[in-house]
Image (cartoon, helix red, strand yellow):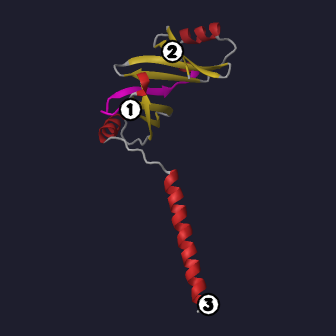
Amino acid sequence: MLTSLKTILCIIILMHTTITNAQSTKELKQEISVPIIVLEKFTQNFPSIEPVWDINYQGTYNQQLVYKGKFIYNNRSSLVVYDKDGNLLVFAATVEKSEIPDKIIKYMAKNFPAFSIVEALLVTRGTDENTYEIAIYVNDQYVVKVFTKSGDFIKTTKT
């Protein structure tokens, strides 16, 4: 009798532990619900690639819901941003320093000689507007310099 009570008690403890672990594991894995239209558009543009999805709000007053997919494309870290209707808003891919136009390299060397380039992206927005975004750290702040595809300076953004 005592042995069967110990067995039942062990089973109850084991079940409780299993259920508790399953719940905490489920809480760690947050499901992101991406609209089917967004998934279809992504698959049309990038067949057989599985991105890691994230959901953000952006735009004026953070009112536009967007879906960001991060993935490797042509051996480059890449990012796509879609709106809720499946419209591709942004495609960005890393570029090597050797691929940055000379005009941009010269601008950075002249204006920021003490700051090395941390990241360089070729960004395409909506209607094939291509820009280079060159990131540097200035006083521990991540600063992005935006240039036209031909290398003309457009603006500075800070994050």
Q: Earlier in the sequence, mark 2 or mark 1?
A: 1
- The relative height of residue 138 versus residue 83 in the rendered view (above or below) is above
The residue that label 1 is drawn on is 65
Question: In the structure shown, which secondary structural element does the residue marked by tag 1 occupy?
Answer: strand
The residue that label 3 is drawn on is 2
Which residue is more in the foreground, 25 or 13?
Answer: 13
Q: Residues within 10 Å of mark 3 (few under 14, many from 20)?
A: few
* Quarter assignment of residue 105: top right
Which residue is more in the foreground, 97 or 128?
Answer: 128
Tell me how far mark 2 sits from mark 1, CA to CA. 24 Å
- The relative height of residue 138 versus residue 9 in the rendered view (above or below) is above
How many numbered circles does the render carry? 3
Q: Residue furthest bottom?
A: 1
Taking the spot 54% from the left edge, 63% from the top edge, the residue there is: 20
Tell me how far mark 2 sits from mark 3, CA to CA. 76 Å
**Numbered mark located on residue 146 in the image:** 2
Which residue is more in the foreground, 114 or 32?
Answer: 32
Q: Determine contact: label 3, label 1, CB under 8 Å.
A: no
The image position of residue 57, as x and y in percent, is 43, 31
Front disc: 3 or 1: 3
The answer to whether residue 95 is magenta is yes
Indicate the amino acid at tag 3.
Leu
Magenta range is 81-97
Taking the spot 37% from the left edge, 26% from the top edge, the residue there is: 89
Indicate the amino acid at tag 2.
Val
Quarter of the picture holding the N terminus: bottom right
Q: Residues within 10 Å of mark 1 (few under 14, many from 20)?
A: few
The answer to whether residue 136 is magenta is no
Q: Is residue 159 left or right of residue 47?
A: right
